Every structure is written in C-alpha cells, then in structure tokens.
Amino acid sequence: MSQPDVPLPAPTAALPAMRTFVPARARRGLTVASQRDCLASVTIDLLAGVAACPFVLPPLALVLRGWWPAGALIAAHLFLAVFWAMGRTPGMYLVGTRLADAATGRDPGFGAGLSRAALLLPAAVALFLLADASLPHPTAPFSRQPVVLWSSLAVLGAAVFSHTWALYDREGRALHDRLCGLVVVRDAGRPGTNG
C-alpha cells in the first residue's frame, strides 16, 4: 500500500522573507580596521608595555614578593581592560583605530573590556610560562614539566586560532571580539584617519 500524497502548505505571509546580510555597523557608517592596523596597534602596545617594565616590575616585586609575575600579568590586563573600556589603547590611538560595541558602535564599557582581557589572559600566561621554561634555571622549574609545556602550546594555538578567525570572518572580527560583542573599527572622529 502506498501512502497518499499530502499536499504541502502554500507559503503564507506569516513566514519571514529571506534577507540579505547587511552588518549593523555598515548602517552606522563604521569601517572595520584592517589586519595591518590591528597588528600595528598590538605591536605598539607591546613595545610600550616592555618599556614600562623597569618602572612597574620593581614596585610589584617589593609588594608581591615572589608573586610579582602573576601581579604583572593581572596589572597588565586590568590596564588593558580600562583602555578597552574607553575604546582604545595607546597603540590603537596612534594607528587610528578604536574598539566599539558591535551592536551600538559606542565605546564598549568596562564589562566588555574586562571580558576581552579575560579571554586573552590565558594566552599571556602561556607565553609567560614558555618564556620561563626557555630561561636557564639551576633547578627544573614548574614551567618545564611536559604537561605545562603542552598545555601552554595548546593555549597559544587557541589564541592564534582566535586571531586568525578574523581573516575568514565575514565581518572581519576576531573570535574573542565576536564572543565579547566587540569590533575593531577605524576611528572616524580622529583627524588624519580615513575611516
């Protein structure tokens, strides 16, 4: 016995029509920053951080004694969270980019800046552990244990994946920015930028 043919319901006006994707920031006039601009701003911020180390690390070493590396990482990430909450780090300012809330185009706020810093903190810890493992030590440090080395490499691989995501994302956003609801854009309000 064969099943009787059942007619499919005709499309009605109640079904939503297919829409072409138009990013909300395009409607607000925001231009996504290029990967070159993002790399330049990160490089400037890293160089500024290295230049600040002689001024920041000795007081941390005195206050936190043996825990100064952890204190330095936490201080650096709180520093970045504050700058990201305002929308730009010093490197972003010099390059002419800013961080914006993807939904509104406004400065992200401290919560989003802290979330972005928290997503990038494991990569900084992994990089610190790998650097520590490469330095000569009289005894085998914690960072040279195989599980720590492999975990650090895996975390750094995830950070590279997160940044590489921006190359293939249709909106040009890195994975950590997509998770936080942020986007790096050209700063149209700053003279000398063409965004």
Image: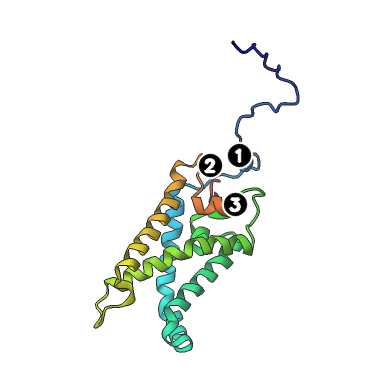
Tell me the kind of residue under disc 1: Pro
Furthest toward the front, the residue is 1
Which element carries disc 1, helix, strand or loop? Answer: loop
Quickly name the residue at label 3: 181
In the figure, is residue 189 to the left or right of 91?
A: right
Report x, y in % for residue 38: 46, 53
In the figure, is residue 91 to the left or right of 156?
A: right
Quickly name the residue at label 1: 23
Q: CA distance from mark 1 to mark 2?
A: 7 Å
Of labels 3 and 2, earlier in sequence is: 2
In the figure, is residue 59 to the left or right of 136?
A: right
Query: Residue sitting at 51 percent across and 69 percent down?
Result: 77
Residues 64 and 90: in front is 64
Report x, y in % for residue 92: 51, 58
Is there any visible trace of residue 73 in the rendered image?
A: yes
Report x, y in % for residue 23: 60, 39
In the figure, is residue 88 to the left or right of 159?
A: right
Quickly name the residue at label 2: 171
Tell me the kind of residue under disc 2: Glu
Query: Residue sitting at 60 percent across and 45 percent down?
Result: 30
- Mark 1–mark 2 contact, CB under 8 Å? yes
Tell me the kind of residue under disc 3: Gly
Q: CA distance from mark 3 to mark 2?
A: 12 Å
Which element carries disc 2, helix, strand or loop? Answer: loop
Of labels 1 and 2, earlier in sequence is: 1
